[in-house]
Image (cartoon, rainbow, N blue to C red):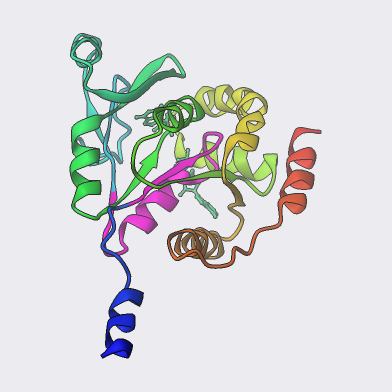
């Protein structure tokens, strides 16, 4: 009888979902990684609102809720945002209700948001576990390559976002984990195993000194 009750005690507790934030300088690959993670059972993406124009490849209400400034301001006034920020001349924000609903249904919620949003969510100290990731490119040359390919119509966009890179990268220090997106599959596995280790209190394979020296190279 005793042994049986001990076994029951050791069974995992029913838990709410966890919040997983991925941020990065533009073009490092966080949107791609969030999409890959969202294919895992029990993972779901938080769909943001934005005043930005959709890219040709983007699907409204799936990639973003595309809204005008009037609607965005209404959501601010109604206090519907968990966080919002101005990024590259456009507004972006996460509404609270869909996120909390998913977490309460034990879904892990993925956020593709910038450092300003990550800071706001961190400061809210919600009753859900939060894991934050900062994604870095292998090099500046590779970053420019990725940005140019993605925003083919507009070289200016790629150049503008490269200028921002030096400023964005400085925020790496405020994240739980920094991961380099060189090989996509490897980067994905690294993030997944760090999340699993966090959820199960397992050991984390993470080398902060290596990251520190990579950041130095990127900013030199
Ligand atoms: P972010 O969301 O960080 O701005 P994206 O996910 O949109 O970046 O990625 C930028 C571009 O780089 C996309 O065209 C994407 O397909 C490509 N990309 C992402 N990860 C890799 C990778 N590991 N190797 C090569 N190209 C990549
Ligand atoms: P993009 O225009 O390339 O889709 O996104 C530009 C930046 O805005 C990215 O850094 C992305 O993570 C960020 N972003 C997207 N949605 C949100 C959001 O809801 N809140 C905040 N703070 N940033 C967001």
Q: Which quadrant is home to the N terminus?
A: bottom left
- Spot occupied by residue 13 in the image (x, y as percentages of width and height): 30, 65
Residue 22 is inside the magenta segment: yes
Identified at 23% across, 26% down, the residue is 66
Viewer-proximal residue among 152 and 172: 172
> Eyeballing the image, is 183 above or below 69?
below
Q: Is residue 198 left or right of residue 203?
A: left
Q: Is residue 79 left or right of residue 113?
A: left
Identified at 26% across, 62% down, the residue is 14
Q: Is residue 150 left or right of residue 57?
A: right
Disc tally is: 0
Residue 53 is inside the magenta segment: no
Q: Which quadrant is home to the C terminus?
A: top right
Identified at 54% across, 29% down, the residue is 158
Viewer-proximal residue among 31 and 107: 107
Viewer-proximal residue among 191 and 103: 103
Q: Is residue 215 left or right of residue 2?
A: right
In magenta, the rendered stretch is 18-44
> Eyeballing the image, is 81 above or below 177?
above
- Spot occupied by residue 146 in the image (x, y as percentages of width and height): 55, 43
- Spot occupied by residue 218 in the image (x, y as percentages of width and height): 74, 39
Ligand 2 image position (quadrant): top left
> Eyeballing the image, is 69 above or below 176?
above
Q: Residue furthest front?
A: 2
Viewer-proximal residue among 20 and 127: 127
Which image quarter: residue 75? top left
């Amino acid at each position: 009888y005793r042994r049986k009750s001990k076994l029951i005690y050791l069974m995992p507790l029913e838990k709410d979902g966890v919040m997983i934030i991925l941020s990065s300088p533009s073009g490092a690959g966080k949107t791609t990684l969030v999409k890959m993670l969202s294919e895992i059972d029990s993972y779901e993406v938080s769909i943001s609102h934005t005043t930005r124009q959709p890219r040709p490849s983007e699907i409204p209400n799936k990639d973003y809720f595309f809204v005008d400034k009037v609607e965005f301001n209404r959501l601010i006034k109604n206090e519907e945002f968990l966080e919002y920020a101005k990024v590259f001349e456009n507004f972006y924000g996460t509404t609270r209700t869909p996120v909390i609903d998913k977490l309460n249904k034990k879904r892990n919620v993925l956020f593709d948001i910038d450092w300003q949003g990550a800071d706001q969510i961190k400061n809210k100290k919600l009753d859900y576990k939060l894991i934050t990731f900062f994604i870095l490119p292998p090099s500046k040359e590779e970053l420019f390559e990725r940005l140019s390919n993605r925003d083919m119509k507009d070289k200016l966009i790629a150049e503008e976002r490269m200028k921002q890179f030096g400023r964005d990268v400085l925020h790496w220090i405020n994240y739980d984990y920094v991961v380099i997106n060189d090989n996509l599959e490897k980067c994905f596995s690294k993030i997944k195993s760090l999340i699993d280790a966090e959820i199960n209190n397992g050991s984390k394979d993470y080398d902060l000194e290596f990251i520190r020296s990579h950041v130095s190279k990127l900013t030199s």
